[in-house]
Image: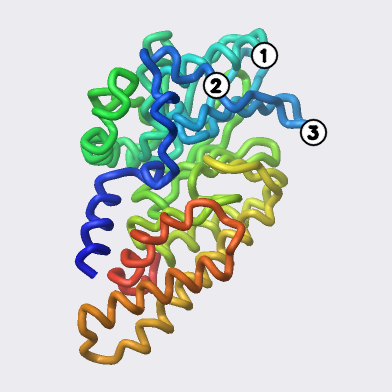
Amino acid sequence: MAALIRLCVALVLATPLACAPKPADTDKPEAGAKAAESAEGASRLPDDARIGRYVSSPWGFSTVSYWIEGEEGVVVIDTQFLPSAARELLRVAEDMTQKPVVAAIVLHPNPDKFNGAAVFQERGVPVLTSDQVIAAIPSVHAKRLAAFGERYRPDYPETAPTLESFGDASTTLELAGLPLQAIVLGPGCSDAHVAIAFDGHLFVGDLVATDGHAWLELGYVEEWRARLAQLQALAPKHVHPGRGPSAGAVALVDQDRYLALVAAIVDQERARLGEAPTRADLGAAIDRARARVVEAYPGLRFPVFLEIGIPAVFRRPRATQP
């Protein structure tokens, strides 16, 4: 159990990305500008060429950013984990559309969403999000800088970004000639979220993981499920996650089913513990719960996420009013 606690503390200091397999030392860039050279690729959505997708290199944790092309320019969704990847994203989006990037939007306070913001701002591109996300960024940045700064220096921002706010409530943003519905959401994967809806497309960040286990560092299972219910009510045709392939609306249903199973397994293991469990009993219950989730979803990447996620769910009482 002591080893488990030490691991959980280390992971809390890191981001979910820290659990990904560490790239080989030869993958570490000699200079920041090289980090994006082996980006996994950029493409347009096959059935809607207005939507583009950029996936960073594995050194940048295969982070996905999107762009939406309008008559007056391009809007980017999420600014990447590494500044070098943000520069590559800007170049690729403008090359493929032959239009300028005129704005970027950050969906929630994780470094893979906001670390590239200064690169956009240096180009005069405003980076927007909600008041709630802005409020959460400084503490998240401080924690993640402590975990990642030395490893990625000089390709990691030393200071937290200062983003522009569109307010604290859902609204329609008129950007690049596009009406983008910005939906302000409460806790889920992070303490605050924004989703962007446009013409059947829904950009959700890490509220959906289409090919990996959920990052449950905060233990917000019921709150997260409430966010998914809000998004399902929008009836999107396309759901675009922060990592993993885009999918249809079924991705929201699948994510909710996953979280419901996690909650049920943790409740069952809690019930087995009785009134006064020992530390060893609790450790065994956590191990059983984690193994049961992996067994139920053997094809998902990053099962190591559960080494902090399952204990976090155990610690947090089930929410009744997310």
The residue at which mark 1 appears reads as: 96
Q: Which amino acid does label 3 sit on?
A: Asp
Residue at 45 percent across and 30 percent down: it is 60
Q: Nearer the viewer, residue 268 or 204?
A: 268
Can residue 284 be seen from the camera position used here?
A: yes
Residue drawn 55% across the image and 38% down it: 196
Viewer-side label of 1, 2? 2
The disc at residue 83 is none
Is residue 135 at all visible to an observer of this figure? Answer: no
Q: Which of 29 and 271 is in front in this view?
A: 29
For discs 3 and 2, the disc positioned in front in the rendered view: 2
Closest to the observer, 169 or 254: 254
User: In this figure, which residue is indicated by the disc labeled 2?
Assistant: 38
Residue designated by label 3? 47
Quadrant where the image shows the N terminus: bottom left
Q: Is 23 above or below relative to 125?
A: below
| Position of residue 76 measured from the top left corner of the image (x, y, whole percent) | 54, 24
Residue at x-position 60% and y-position 11%: 94
Q: For residue 124, what is the image quadrant?
A: top left
Q: Is residue 95 above or below residue 223?
A: above
Give the image quarter of residue 83: top left
Q: Which amino acid does label 2 sit on?
A: Ser
